[in-house]
Image: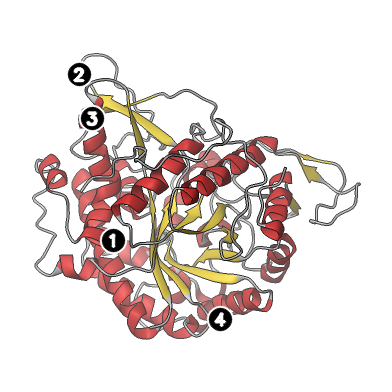
Amino acid sequence: MTIDILPDTRESPEGNPDYRDSGLVFDTAFVIGSATASYQIEGAVTADGRGTSIWDTFSAKPGAIVNGDTGEVADDHYNRLEDDLDLMADLGLEAYRFSIAWPRIQPLGSGAANEAGLDFYSRLVDGLLDRGIRPIATLYHWDLPQALEDAGGWTNRETAYRFAEYARLVASELGDRVQVWTTLNEPWCSAFLGYGSGAHAPGRASGADALAAMHHLNLAHGLAVQVLREVVPNAEVSVTLNFHVLRGDDESSPQAIRRIDALANRSFTGPMLAGGYPADLIADTAEVTDWSFVRAGDAAIIHQPLDFLGVNYYSTARVRMWNGTSPRENADGHKDVGGSPWPGSLDVEFLTQDGPFTAMGWNIAPDGLEELLVSLSSQFPELPLMITENGAAFDDEVVGGDGGGLNGGVDGARVHDAERLDYLRRHFTAAHRAMSRGVDLRGYLVWSLLDNFEWGYGYSKRFGIVHVDYATQQRTVKDSGRWLSKLIRSHTIPE
């Protein structure tokens, strides 16, 4: 099985070649909303019995995060819940994807539930339902309890079983109201950036650890799906993967694409959706690990039926085999702190692409989203898709008065983020074109609702459709947020 990110025989519908279409209509059943993650927005890291996460520990390491930022306060969402819920309602969100902080539920990663933590998410879910917003709960968005990391983290098989126990506690509390569940968000980042490159928490730089973590995350996913099916039998269950859309440069590129595709994409779609790890992935990494962490029966546990696949997409990558003599380019879009997220493929180089770029240095390529959706639909035709993250970071500036509510007057504060608005317009167009080519795409969740703690980049990068002044916690809806609100209300891409 391969993820060949190439157009298939279904022709793309006519439209502007730059993807700047308008007037395209989405069916009313198509869900449009936004997404966040617990550590990036909640703050209150010691409130109400919350335990320490690996991101609390990692953020405290000198030099780990730009400007020494931490998630200690973030957007103070934990204390501003009702106001933020009202903001979502003002925007007209049809769905809101949030993640649950494992250390709020089990401070040490095991044992009885912390009732105060469950209560926070119960109030969040009730608040969403009261406002007519569909809750989409993600069980894991990277904030592993530090106590579990101390016992080996995701390199320890037991962490997968602790995750299943945690899933049972959360589903038993919220399952009567949450009907859409995601097990893991971007497990590639958890494994390969957290344990391979060292750019993410817990900050390890070991190829063997990265591959072991990858497998135990896959195992945790399968175990959690089984729990969710048991506890919430009528719910929709999914996983969210961040797909690397790969492009070539020369005659060596097909080999480079195959190798990076195996690590970035098929290391998860293989076991989760096709029942096993690709043989070429195992061969490519044979000098890194002996794969003894895979046990008999694991494949059946991991390969669980899903109701849809969550797709996160931001940009493309261009690769070729390194000649071993010229300086090796490493423009893979991920923060470089010395380690590598590509075990067994250090002879592949990532080439700088043509712009324009977002503030993250990621190229803007809406055609890549269309091609990805069509490719996944072709390979897994029975599995519906949902865009669970797509968005862009740009440098934003607040102008005008002190207001900023969605319906504020002419003197209210504004953020004229034309680049982000254009980015979203083009990517919504790409999604619409993919659907016109037969892709069963169920929804689109913009990343992110709020400016927030952007992991290793701290507060230096802003993805939100709502601006956050971190000193005052003032929220200001950006022009992109207003545009999205119009799109939601009409289900038509605005002029």
Q: Where is residue 78 in the image (x, y as percent from the top left)?
A: 62, 68
Q: What residue is pinned by disc 2?
A: 324
Q: Say which quarter of the image contains residue 303.
A: bottom left
The type of residue carrying mark 4 is Asp
**Residue 382 shows which numbered tag?**
none
SS class of the residue under badge 4? helix
Instruction: Say few, some or many: other residues with alpha carbon within 10 Å of mark 1 (under 14 / 14 to 19 / 20 or more).
Output: many
- The C terminus lies in which quarter of the figure? top right
Cα–Cα span, label 1 and label 3: 28 Å
Q: Check disc 2 and report its element: helix, strand or loop.
A: loop
Above or below 170: residue 318: above
- Tell me the quarter of the picture where residue 22 sits: top right
Label located before the other in sequence (2 or 4): 4
Circle nearer the N terminus (1, 3)? 1
Q: Which of marks 2 and 4 is in front?
A: 2
**Residue 100 visible in the picture:** no
Image coordinates of residue 41 in percent, x first then y, are 58, 58
Q: Can residue 196 be seen in this view?
A: yes
Q: How far apart are marks 2 and 1 (CA)?
A: 33 Å
Can you say whether 293 is above or below 266 in the image? below
Circle on res. 217: 1
Helix, strand or loop for disc 1: helix
| Rendered residue at 75%/39% (across/down) | 416
User: Residue at the location (27% across, 41% down)?
Assistant: 261
Tags 2 and 1 in contact by the CB under 8 Å rule? no
Q: Which one is closest to the eye, mark 2 or mark 3?
A: 3
Q: Identify the residue under disc 4.
A: 119
